[in-house]
Image (cartoon, rainbow, N blue to C red):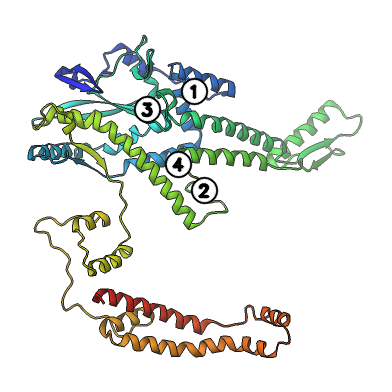
C-alpha cells in the first residue's frame, strides 16, 4: 500500500498495521519502558533551568519533558489549570462531514467512519491525551488496526510519554522515537502525531512548559522561604534561665523542659529555674504570599488567558466573568482546531484510505472531523425577535433554528410537540405579572384600560413623594437653604407604593408589546 503524508510517499505492509512500532520484542522499546525519570525539578535553580531549556533547543528534549512532568505533579495550581483546559476539549461533540457536493458513496464513507469512531469507548481519553501537547508542545498516541466486519478499525490507543522522543539532528520540527542512536522515524499509520503550538516556533519551544517553568521556580523559592519563616518565627521563643552555679545535669534538665514546652505544651524543670516566653519577631508572611499569588496569576494567564475562573479576588463581577469565560471559549476553540487537523491527517484520512469505497486517489475529497463549538442561544432572547421577523415576512429556515437552539431535528415518525387549539387558560386566582399576562391574552381590549388604571393609580403615589419637596421649595428663602433641606430627606421618603405601581406598569407595557408582535400589528 502506498500512503502519502505531507507530500512524502510511504509503502505500508498490511502486517505493520496490526503491530505497534513499540512492541515488547523491540529492545529499545523495552528500554524505554524501564526508564525512570530524573526529576530535574529537584534542586532546580535559574541556571539549571536555563541549561535544560537550552539543551532542548539543541535537540535533546529529555530533561525538558521530565521537567514538564515534575511541574504538573508538584504544582497543584498548574495541574488544576491544565486540567481545565484539557477537559474543555475532551467533552465537545464532533461529527464526520463529507466533502462539499458529496456523492452518495462519499456520504456512505463518512457515515461508516462515524460508526467506527463511535465504537471507540475511550475516545474522550484519546482527546485528553492529545491535549497534553498544550503543556509539552507535542503529544503522540500509538495505535494499531484490526479487521472487523470487512473494515480496518483503529484500536488500542496508548499515549506514549514525551520523554520517549527526540528531535531529528537535521530537522528541528521532526520527532523521532529514541532508540539509543539517532532515532527511528514514526510509522505514518500507527501514530497520532499531534503538535500543539501554544506559541509559534519549532517543536522544542512550542509548549507552555517554557513559560510556566519560570513562575514555577520563583513560587517554589517563596514557598520555601515562607516555610522557614513560619518555622523560625511562627511560635514564641522560649528562653530558660538557670541560677549561677547550676550543674550540667541541671542545665540539661532545663533544656529538655524548654523543648518539651515547645512541642508538648508541658514540661518540668528544677526548682529555682525560670522559663520566659518572648514574642516572635514582628512582621508576617504577606510578602511571600504576595509573590506566590503573583506567580499563580501568571500561571493562570498563560494557561487559560485569564484569572477570574481560578480566583474571584476583590474585583469580580458578572460582566467581567462573562468576558473571561469568553476568553476561555476562544482558547478552547483554537485548541480544537489544532486537534481536528491532527485527527484528520493521522486518523480520518487513513480510515478513508483503508476503508473508503469512494476513494479514487484524491485525498482532498476525504471526510473531515469537525468539532461542534457553537453555543446554544438563549431560547427566550431568541423567541420574541423571531416572532417579529417572521411577522414582517422574513423567511427563516427551521434547520438554522435547530442549529441555534441545539434542539435536534425530529426523526421520521417521531411525535412532535404542538400547540393545542383548546389549551387550558391560566387560572383566575393570579396576581402581579401572571395576572396581567392572563388578562392581556384573554381580553386584549382590556390592556389599554388597564394601563389607564395604572396611570391614575400612580398619581397619588407620585404626589405623596413630591409633597415634602414642594413644601421645602415653598418655604425656602435661598437656594443654599433649599439644598440643605433636601439633604435631610435622604432615607425618609417611602417609594414602596410607587415602586409597586411602576412594576405593574412595566409588566403591562411589555405584555402589550408582546401581544402586538404576535398579532402582527
Q: CA distance from mark 3 to mark 2?
A: 29 Å
* Residue 383, horizontal then vertical, whole percent: 28, 65
Instruction: Please give the residue where the numbered disc 4 appears in the rendered image.
Output: 304
Label 3–label 1 contact, CB within 8 A:
no
Residue 45 makes an appearance in the image: no
- Asked where in the image residue 59 lies, by quadrant, the reply is top left
Residue 117 at what x, y percent from top left? 20, 37
Which mark lies nearer to you, 3 or 2? 3
How far apart, in angstroms, are the residues tagged by discs 4 and 3? Answer: 18 Å
Mark nearer the N terminus (3 vs 1): 1
- Residue at the extreme right of the image, as rendered: 244
Residue at 33% in and 39% down: 336
Looking at this view, is 240 or 2 the one in front? 2
Report the mark closest to the observer, 4 or 2.
4
- Mark closer to the chain start, 4 or 3: 3
Q: On the image, numbered disc 1 is attached to which residue?
A: 39
Q: Residues within 10 Å of mark 2 (few under 14, many from 20)?
A: few
Q: Nearer the viewer, residue 200 or 379?
A: 200
The residue closer to the viewer here, 388 or 327, is 388
Q: Which residue is mark 3?
A: 138
- Could you classify mark 4 by the number of other residues whose Cα lies within 10 Å: few (under 14), some (14-19), or many (20 or more)? many
The disc, 3 or 2, on the residue closer to the chain's N-terminal end is: 3
Amino acid at each position: 500500500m502506498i500512503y502519502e503524508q505531507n507530500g512524502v510517499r510511504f509503502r505500508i505492509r498490511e502486517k505493520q498495521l496490526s503491530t505497534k512500532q513499540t512492541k515488547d520484542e523491540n529492545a529499545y522499546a523495552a528500554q524505554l519502558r524501564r526508564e525512570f525519570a530524573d526529576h530535574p525539578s529537584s534542586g532546580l535553580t535559574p541556571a539549571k533551568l536555563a541549561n535544560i531549556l537550552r539543551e532542548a533547543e539543541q535537540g535533546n528534549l529529555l530533561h525538558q519533558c521530565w521537567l514538564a512532568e515534575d511541574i504538573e505533579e508538584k504544582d497543584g495550581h498548574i495541574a488544576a489549570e491544565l486540567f481545565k483546559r484539557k477537559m474543555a476539549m475532551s467533552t465537545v461533540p464532533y461529527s464526520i462531514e463529507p466533502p462539499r457536493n458529496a456523492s452518495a458513496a462519499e456520504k456512505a464513507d463518512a457515515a461508516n467512519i462515524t460508526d467506527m469512531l463511535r465504537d471507540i469507548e475511550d475516545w474522550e481519553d484519546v482527546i485528553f491525551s492529545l491535549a497534553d501537547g498544550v503543556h509539552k508542545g507535542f503529544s503522540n498516541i500509538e495505535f494499531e488496526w484490526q479487521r472487523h466486519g470487512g473494515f480496518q478499525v483503529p484500536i488500542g490507543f496508548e499515549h506514549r510519554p514525551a520523554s520517549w522522543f527526540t528531535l531529528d539532528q537535521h530537522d528541528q520540527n521532526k520527532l523521532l522515537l529514541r532508540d539509543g542512536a539517532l532515532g527511528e522515524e514514526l510509522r505514518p499509520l500507527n501514530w497520532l502525531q499531534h503538535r500543539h503550538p501554544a506559541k509559534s516556533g519549532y517543536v522544542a519551544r512550542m509548549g507552555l512548559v517554557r513559560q510556566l517553568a519560570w513562575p514555577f521556580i520563583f513560587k517554589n523559592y517563596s514557598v520555601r522561604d515562607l516555610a522557614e519563616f513560619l518555622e523560625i518565627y511562627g511560635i514564641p521563643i522560649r528562653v530558660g534561665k538557670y541560677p549561677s552555679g547550676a550543674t550540667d545535669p541541671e542545665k540539661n534538665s532545663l533544656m529538655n523542659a524548654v523543648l518539651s514546652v515547645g512541642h508538648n505544651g508541658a514540661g518540668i524543670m528544677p526548682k529555682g529555674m525560670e522559663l520566659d516566653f518572648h514574642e516572635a519577631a514582628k512582621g508576617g508572611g504577606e510578602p511571600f504570599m504576595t509573590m506566590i499569588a503573583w506567580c499563580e496569576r501568571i500561571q493562570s494567564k498563560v494557561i487559560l488567558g485569564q484569572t477570574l475562573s481560578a480566583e474571584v479576588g476583590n474585583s469580580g463581577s458578572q460582566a467581567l466573568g462573562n468576558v473571561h469565560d469568553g476568553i476561555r471559549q476562544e482558547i478552547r476553540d483554537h485548541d480544537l482546531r489544532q486537534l481536528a487537523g491532527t485527527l484528520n491527517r493521522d486518523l480520518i484520512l487513513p480510515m478513508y484510505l483503508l476503508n473508503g469505497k469512494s476513494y479514487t486517489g484524491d485525498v482532498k475529497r476525504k471526510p473531515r472531523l469537525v468539532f461542534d463549538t457553537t453555543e446554544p442561544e438563549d431560547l427566550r432572547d431568541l423567541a420574541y425577535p423571531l416572532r417579529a421577523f417572521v411577522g414582517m415576512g422574513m423567511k427563516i429556515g427551521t434547520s438554522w433554528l435547530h442549529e441555534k437552539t441545539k434542539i435536534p431535528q425530529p426523526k421520521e415518525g417521531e411525535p412532535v410537540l404542538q400547540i393545542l387549539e383548546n389549551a387550558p387558560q391560566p387560572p383566575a386566582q393570579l396576581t402581579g405579572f401572571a395576572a396581567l399576562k392572563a388578562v392581556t391574552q384573554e381580553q386584549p381590549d382590556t390592556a389599554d384600560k388597564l394601563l389607564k388604571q395604572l396611570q391614575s393609580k400612580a398619581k397619588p403615589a407620585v404626589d405623596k413623594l413630591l409633597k415634602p419637596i414642594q413644601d421645602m421649595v415653598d418655604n425656602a428663602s435661598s437656594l443654599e437653604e433649599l439644598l440643605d433641606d433636601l439633604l435631610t430627606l435622604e432615607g425618609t421618603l417611602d417609594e414602596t407604593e410607587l415602586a409597586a405601581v411602576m412594576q405593574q406598569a412595566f409588566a403591562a407595557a411589555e405584555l402589550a408589546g408582546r401581544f402586538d408582535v404576535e398579532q402582527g400589528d
